[in-house]
């Protein structure tokens, strides 16, 4: 009961228009949202303009994909018209600063999108293009890079970065009862160990969490009221078995290549 399902066409450059239409129709039939990668690189946008005469955002809108709830990953190279379309069609954005920096994709215009009313959450884009699944790292990057990119030390505040990693991310995934510690919200809770040197002095816990904290500080995790990690020990996963399986697969992969 904890899983939400989305259809996941990868991107316009791997999924042609007829396929996108099929995804749109299936999403309508089964009443489920769609997750897609859009405008991650400049080359992707240039090729789409050359092939279809439209940006990836305009093309997806033209194909009717935005008539369904959409979570669009990246949205790095979007223009003002793209942002207008996204705001009008309530497209949510998964901002992946770590991946975008590592792959030299660029920096998404998060300030423009947020000012237009677009919901922006944070993601990692997976370990394959990031090397980390650390949401604390993404919050820190989101709070830093947009300050530098906009020459504004208040462009994305520590509180806004944390909101993007929690309540705004929950909205992107279609939850209206997740991301806050309030009555009526799901009991998805983390407890943070603040004993490390990097948590001192404690002038501002929000600022420390955004700029100094990391995933290894998380001591306890509760999902919908159920403990899944306590005292940094995973309670539902056999970690030794996972590490052994990862090692086995890695050895097979390297022996194959």
Image (tube, grey):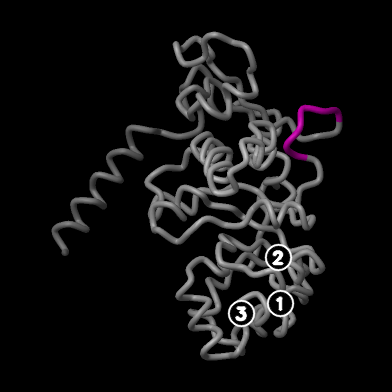
Going from N to C along the chain, the mark reached first, 2 or 3, is: 3
In the figure, residue 170 lies in which quadrant? top right
**Residue at 77% of width from left, 76% of height from top?**
29
Disc number placed over residue 70 in the picture, else none: 2
Q: CA distance from mark 3 to mark 1?
A: 14 Å
| Image coords of residue 217 (percent x, y) | 49, 22
Quick check: 161 above or below 126? above
Q: Say if mark 1 contacts mark 2, CB within 8 Å.
A: yes
What main secondary structure does the magenta stretch of the protein show? loop
Question: In the image, what residue occupies the spot 69% across and 37% down?
Answer: 160
Q: Secondary structure at mark 1?
A: helix
User: In the displayed structure, does residue 163 sit left or right of residue 199?
Assistant: right
- Position of 80 with respect to 202 (left or right) is right
Q: Which residue in the protein does label 1 denote? A: 65
Q: Which residues are magenta?
A: 178-183
Disc 3 secondary structure class:
loop
Name above or below for residue 61 compared with residue 17: above
Extreme residue in the front direction: 151
Report which residue position mark 3 lands on. 55
- The residue lying furthest to the right in this view is 184
Does 88 sit left or right of 220 as displayed? right
Where residue 76 sits in the image (x, y, percent)? 56, 62
Q: Between label 3 and label 1, give the one nearer the viewer.
A: 3
- Quadrant of residue 84 within the rendered picture: bottom right
Element marked by disc 2: strand
């Amino acid at each position: 009961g904890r899983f939400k399902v989305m259809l996941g066409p990868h991107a316009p450059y791997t999924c042609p228009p007829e396929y996108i239409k099929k995804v749109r129709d299936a999403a309508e039939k089964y009443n489920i949202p769609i997750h897609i990668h859009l405008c991650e690189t400049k080359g992707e946008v240039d090729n789409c303009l050359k092939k279809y005469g439209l940006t990836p955002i305009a093309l997806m809108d033209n194909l009717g994909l935005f008539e369904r709830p959409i979570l669009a990953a990246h949205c790095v190279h979007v223009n003002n018209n793209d942002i207008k379309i996204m705001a009008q069609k309530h497209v949510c954005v998964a901002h992946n600063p770590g991946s975008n920096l590592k792959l030299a994709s660029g920096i998404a215009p998060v300030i423009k999108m947020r000012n237009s009313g677009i919901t922006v959450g944070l993601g990692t884009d997976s370990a394959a293009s990031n090397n980390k699944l650390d949401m604390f790292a993404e919050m820190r990057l989101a709070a830093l890079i947009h300050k530098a990119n906009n020459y504004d030390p208040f462009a994305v505040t520590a509180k806004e970065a944390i909101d993007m990693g929690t309540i705004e991310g929950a909205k992107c995934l279609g939850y209206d009862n997740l991301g806050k510690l309030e009555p009526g919200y799901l009991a998805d809770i983390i407890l943070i160990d603040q004993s490390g040197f990097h948590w001192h002095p404690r002038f501002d816990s929000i600022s420390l969490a955004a700029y100094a904290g990391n995933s290894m500080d998380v001591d306890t995790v509760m999902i919908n009221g159920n403990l899944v990690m306590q005292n940094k020990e995973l309670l539902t996963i056999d970690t030794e078995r996972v590490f052994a399986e990862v090692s086995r697969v890695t050895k097979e992969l390297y022996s194959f290549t």
